[in-house]
Image (cartoon, rainbow, N blue to C red):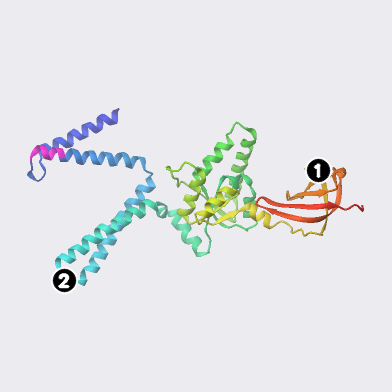
Amino acid sequence: MGIIIFRILILLMVGAAGYFFPLFRIDARISAAIALVLAGTIMVLETQIRKTQFKIIWGSTVGTFAGVLLGWGLGSVYQTITDDRVTVLFIRLFFLIIMPYIGFLVGTRKSEWLDPAYLFRFFKEKSVGRSYKILDTSVIIDGRIADLCDTSFIEGTLIVPQFVLKELQLVADSADALKRQRGRRGLDILNHLQKSKGVSVMITEMDFPDIRDVDSKLIELAKRMDGKLVTNDLNLEKVARLHGLSILNVNELANALKPIVLPGEQMRVFLIKEGKEKDQGVAYLDDGTMVVVDNSRRWIGQNIDITVTSVLQTTVGKMIFGRYNEER
């Protein structure tokens, strides 16, 4: 309520100034009306500016001033191509209008370019051929990203958006014990990554208030920063690839590094439960690969030698099928 009264007072003062000191000696009432319209327009702009992030305001301001300077310089250069005074004036006005316009839009859309940390990291990383890698919540909670960084298979700068950190904190504060444990594990992984010597972790404040979905925000952030998205989420990967983004899927890397098993090879497994079909047993390798064994139900709870009959590759990993070797 107080701000409304203050604004009304300002409007009255500006209107009075326009009435008692008419613009260009026009009618006092028309001058007061013009002053009120100008003041009202400025107040509308002020309310919009207060809703805008400071970095966008800063970016648009710097971009506009840079556009003015560049427009003035280009106008001064190109005015030498003609002696016609009117043409010279048009050229200067053209550049003084169009360049601030471009600077304002670029500064608004790419405000992160003016972040000193961004500029420093950009030039540093481009010089050594690295790129930004943006982490999503799933890959942080998974934890294997820390092992990859420790072994130097991933290097450079890992970007953790503030909205991902917020989502991770919500999971860590969940009433569900399992979710709470997963969230806290994710925070521990981030702490470990920050201490890692092979990578640097940068938490970015860049957000997109108009976008509610975290996955959509990650895609937009990857576009803005020209970075690679690191995830375990298959659906996010598919959507991101449709947008032309580069994806690093830890699950795909793990599957690619699994030992290759060929039909006809012998292997020893420990059966832990029954299979879906008659007389089947199920075992798991150390990496979690499921092994389905025919003619083995009676040997559940024991180590047995099997012969691999086929290997099925799925989007979530490999499945190995085999048969029990009767001769023990």
Does residue 254 appear left or right of residue 32 in this picture? right
Viewer can see residue 252:
yes
Give me the disc on residue 83: 2
Percent across and percent down for residue 185 are 63, 41
Image location (x, y in percent) of residue 206: 45, 47
Q: Main secondary structure of the magenta part?
A: helix
Instruction: Examine the structure image and report whether residue 29 is included in the region drawn in magenta.
Output: yes
Residue 191 shows in the view: no
Of the residues shown, which amino acid type is indicated by label 1? Ile
| Span of residues in magenta | 27-33
Secondary structure at badge 1 equals strand
Distance from Cα at disc 1 to Cα at disc 2: 92 Å
Which residue is at a point 36% across and 53% down the rendered structure image? 107
Mark 1 or 2: in front is 1
Residue closest to the eye, 27 or 322:
322
Q: Who is closer to the viewer here, 151 or 251? A: 251
The residue positioned 18% from the left and 66% from the top of the image is 88
- Measuring from the top left, give residue 151's x and y in whole percent: 65, 57
Residue identified by numbered label 1: 272
Tell me the element at label 2: loop
